[in-house]
Image (cartoon, helix red, strand yellow):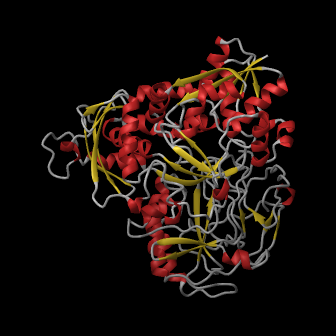
């Protein structure tokens, strides 16, 4: 059996190499990828062979890492959970890819890695292998119970190396784990497992400033840096043409000097737990910021918004290890298309951990100052008067249909509708509004108004038309006019039990004010196809009767309005009302029907089923003015409101 192991020469991988060889009786091939970690690689080949490897590959992958992995990642502007620059995540697919190429060249049976069973790296290594070489096996000692039992801690590993003669330099263990490459360095575990621990405190200068200084230790004078872009790629820094590798090395030095790109976050691992990590990404932070500034000047709005909507998904795919998945490749194709116009120069100011945009320019800029100017437009490309229709058309869908008449009735003078109960739009529109007074004992001068009917609940239209989502609101809800803006008040319905007696409404505005509100509202209701009372009738009747009427249950200045969803429904809808017998506007019941007086209910035999009373309505007519028709009403569903 032949196995290729990802090898670094440290204590862990030295123990792994020897243990795997002994346990699996396998020929071991060590592989070390130079991706910018700047660790001592001298003598690594000799050390691997002495530990038990038959061969040792040491490959410099820095240029490939920058060109084929880091730059495509930054063209997509990807950040995991809006903070993490994906430094470790993007390196693992490259390492696994090269391991697989070596395994195939050596005709190996498996690859092996030292990632633990709690981290993300195990997923990244093995998903890459599944995508590129699905028949290749993977050996993972940290998921083997035998290995964990033999090496529960660092002391056992050191003792094992001494017994086997493995040349390792045992040192005091750092209070955290580290991983470094060309893009970043990460710190996690150990003392960082406490999320309250302050990694930026001055006493930790020896721990968390490998690539960058703390911002308070940065120079007191800002430094400017310019980055030139072409099709989304940075091709020069401060006017000097550089390869992707040269760009990253230069930006790392500049950013590290000024303490930019430091991130301390609690992230969500793919394996299901949260972990705390501290990252230094000085060059990557500058590149990401400058690239975004270049896009703001040169990328089409809709293209940018579409690409931005996909950033979380793209970042997840990289973080989870799906770099070689078909969905990531598809997203990358969209990204590349979006970057065709991202060309120009960005100037960035670096100062004590901050990145500040100091200018941007492009030969293909989409910014046109002659259009954006607040002064007179010499080109006359933008006519400000056109905005009126633009806003009107885009605002058509915004108001609730019940609010629109009141907004128009207020004449734009602050009239708003505050609804304390949700009132859905009826399925059969347009709907009628019937205006009545509560407990008024005298009839109005106009037979159209019929204010003697006392409507104590909202109309519930559920008949043969099938309007199951028609208006449905609490009983005894009242609309009181304050100024010219109506307000739905259902406190009475919530505070009083259901009964045959009308709920009392709170006092509202004067009769003249309410009559004015109805006067302004009536024409609007008529434009919406509603059969409603005339404004003159309401005004006259309100002035004459509303303020002077007295009676049981009456409250001065109160009106009740009922919305009847009947205008385009078939005549088998029901409206829960109470009406006085013999009102001029309300016809008498048909012969043979039973009736009760004094504001109680009409009953017309078995044709009407209602907890209160029901008035049959015909299509498109006022409820009170509709001739009676004796037709059976379908039984109400058990779940229907009463």
Query: In which quadrant of the rendered view does residue 503 lie?
Result: bottom right
Q: Nearer the viewer, residue 251 or 489?
A: 251
Image location (x, y in percent) of residue 22: 82, 27
Image location (x, y in percent) of residue 415: 44, 69
Q: Is residue 202 above or below residue 176?
A: below
For this view, does 527 lie left or right of residue 564?
A: left
Q: Residue at x 69, y 59 (%)?
A: 472
Q: Residue at x 46, y 47 (%)?
A: 211
Image location (x, y in percent) of residue 285: 43, 45
Q: Is residue 249 above or below residue 581?
A: above
Q: Residue at x 66, y 21 (%)?
A: 131
Query: In which quadrant of the rendered view does residue 15 lie?
Result: top right
Q: Nearer the viewer, residue 514 or 599?
A: 514
For this view, does 167 lie left or right of residue 360?
A: right
**Residue 114 in view of the camera:** no
Image location (x, y in percent) of residue 448: 56, 65
For this view, does 398 lie left or right of residue 192?
A: left
For this view, does 218 lie left or right of residue 223?
A: right
**Residue 568 in view of the camera:** yes
Q: Quadrant of the C terminus?
A: bottom right
């Amino acid at each position: 059996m032949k196995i290729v192991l990802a090898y670094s020469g440290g204590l862990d991988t030295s123990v792994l190499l020897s243990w795997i060889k002994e346990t699996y009786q396998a020929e071991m091939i060590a592989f070390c990828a130079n991706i910018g970690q700047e660790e001592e690689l001298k003598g690594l080949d000799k050390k691997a062979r002495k530990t038990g490897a038959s061969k040792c590959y040491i490959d410099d992958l820095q240029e490939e890492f920058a060109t084929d992995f880091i730059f495509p990642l930054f063209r997509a502007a990807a950040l995991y959970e809006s903070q993490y620059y994906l430094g470790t995540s993007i390196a693992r697919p490259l390492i696994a890819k090269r391991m697989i190429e070596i395994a195939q060249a050596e005709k190996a049976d498996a690859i092996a890695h030292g990632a633990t069973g709690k981290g993300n790296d195990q997923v990244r290594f093995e998903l890459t292998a599944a995508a590129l070489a699905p028949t290749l096996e993977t050996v993972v000692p940290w998921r083997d119970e035998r290995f964990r039992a033999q090496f529960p801690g660092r002391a056992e590993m050191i003792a094992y190396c001494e017994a086997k003669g493995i040349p390792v330099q045992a040192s005091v263990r750092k209070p955290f784990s580290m991983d470094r490459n060309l893009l970043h360095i990460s710190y996690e575990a150990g003392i960082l497992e406490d999320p309250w621990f302050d990694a930026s405190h001055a006493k930790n200068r020896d721990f968390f400033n490998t690539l960058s200084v703390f911002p308070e230790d940065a120079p007191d004078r800002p430094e400017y840096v310019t980055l030139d872009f072409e099709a989304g790629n940075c091709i020069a820094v401060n006017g000097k043409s550089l390869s992707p590798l040269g760009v990253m090395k230069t930006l790392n030095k500049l950013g590290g000097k000024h303490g930019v790109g430091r991130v301390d976050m609690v992230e969500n691992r793919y394996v299901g737990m949260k972990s705390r990590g501290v990252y230094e990404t000085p060059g990557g932070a500058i590149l990401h910021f400058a690239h975004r500034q270049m896009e703001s000047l040169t990328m089409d709005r809709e293209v940018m918004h579409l690409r931005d909507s996909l950033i979380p998904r793209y970042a997840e795919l990289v973080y989870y290890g799906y770099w070689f998945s078909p969905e990531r490749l598809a997203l990358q194709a969209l990204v590349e298309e979006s970057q065709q116009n991202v060309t120009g120069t960005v100037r960035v100011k670096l100062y004590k951990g901050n990145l500040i945009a100091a200018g941007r320019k492009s030969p293909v800029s989409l910014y046109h100052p002659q259009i954006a100017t607040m002064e007179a437009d010499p080109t006359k490309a933008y006519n400000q008067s056109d905005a009126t229709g633009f806003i009107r058309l885009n605002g058509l869908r915004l108001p609730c249909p019940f609010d629109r008449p009141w907004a128009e009735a207020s004449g734009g003078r602050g009239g708003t509708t505050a609804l304390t109960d949700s009132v859905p739009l009826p399925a059969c529109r347009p709907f009628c509004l019937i205006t009545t007074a509560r407990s008024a004992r005298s009839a109005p001068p106009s037979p159209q108004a019929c204010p003697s009917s006392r409507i104590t609940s909202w109309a519930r239209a559920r008949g043969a038309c099938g309007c199951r989502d028609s208006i449905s609101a609490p009983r005894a809800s009242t609309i009181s006019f304050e100024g010219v803006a109506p307000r739905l008040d259902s406190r009475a319905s919530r505070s009083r039990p259901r009964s045959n007696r009308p709920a009392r409404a709170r006092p509202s505005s004067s009769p003249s004010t309410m009559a004015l509100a109805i006067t302004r509202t009536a024409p609007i209701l008529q434009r919406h196809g509603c059969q409603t009372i005339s404004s003159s009738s309401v005004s006259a009747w309100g002035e004459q009767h509303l303020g002077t009427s007295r009676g049981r249950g009456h409250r001065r200045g109160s009106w009740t309005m009922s919305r009847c969803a009947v205008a385009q429904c078939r005549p088998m809808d029901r409206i829960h009302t109470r009406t006085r017998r013999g009102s001029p506007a309300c016809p008498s019941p048909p012969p043979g029907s039973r009736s009760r007086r004094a504001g109680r209910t009409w009953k017309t035999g078995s044709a009407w089923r209602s907890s209160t009373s029901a008035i049959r309505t015909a299509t498109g007519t006022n409820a009170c003015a509709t001739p009676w028709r004796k037709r059976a009403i379908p039984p109400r569903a058990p779940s229907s409101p009463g």
